[in-house]
Image (spheres, rainbow, N blue to C red):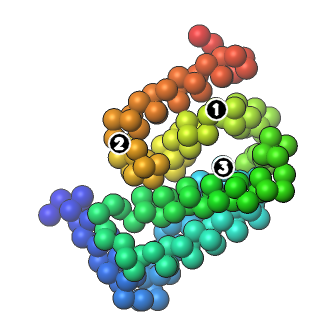
Amino acid sequence: MDAVASAERSELELLQKLQAGDQNAWSEFVQTMRPRLFGYLRHNVPTVEDAEDVLGETMIAAVRALKDFDGRASLSTFVFSLAYRKIADFWRKRQETEALLEQQRSPLSVDSQSVEFAEILDRLPELSKQALILRYHVGLSVGEIAQVIDRSYKGTESLLSRARQQLRDAMIEAGFAHE
């Protein structure tokens, strides 16, 4: 049996255990998903506390939705799809009290280049930014990203291509890179 088939079988077994309410499976699921999911959320909400809140909401949504999850997508794709929607909910709620443009995102690092890069990334269209984060920070495949953002595979490939070009152009404009 090759590694891909073994991983798929292992994920299916984990899904079945989760759906059966196995507490050890839930612990494994949370330990596996939390670091990547938290990193993704941290790129999309202003504070660590907000990321923790959205992480909690995402995990609650996963508990509720996993009972009906059919396993046609990977568990990580399923959970990142939930997180993507919870981020949108977060900002929708936030806009009711403050203008989105007034929000300042805390950088992941105090390094000035990291701050500058985060600011450049924030200038990109939201969907482009999300696609780049999901691809290069979280490490999802193009197919998984397509499922998360509810687009076709080809549409997602095009989006990523445009997003990379937008990022290159923004970095050149900011003096971060050369043509």
* 177 on left or right of 18: right
Element class at badge 2: loop
Amino acid type of the residue tagged 1 in the rendering: Leu
Residue beneath disc 2: 152
Q: Which of the 4 image quarters holds residue 157?
A: top left
Amino acid type of the residue tagged 3 in the rendering: His
Instruction: Decide which of tag 3 and tag 2 comes sooner along the chain.
Output: 3
Point out residue 29 in the picture as x, y percentages from the top left corner.
46, 74
Q: Image height check: is 86 above or below 22?
A: above
Residue 78 visible to an observer of this rendering: yes
Residue beneath disc 1: 124
* 5 on left or right of 57: left
Residue at 73 percent of width and 60 percent of height: 93
Q: CA distance from mark 3 to mark 1?
A: 13 Å
Residue beneath disc 3: 43
- Viewer-side label of 3, 1: 1
Q: CA distance from mark 3 to mark 2?
A: 24 Å
Element class at badge 3: loop
In the rendered view of the protein, which quadrant contains the N terminus? bottom left
Q: Image height check: is 155 above or below 103?
A: above
Point out residue 150 in the picture as x, y percentages from the top left corner.
42, 49
- Viewer-side label of 3, 2: 2
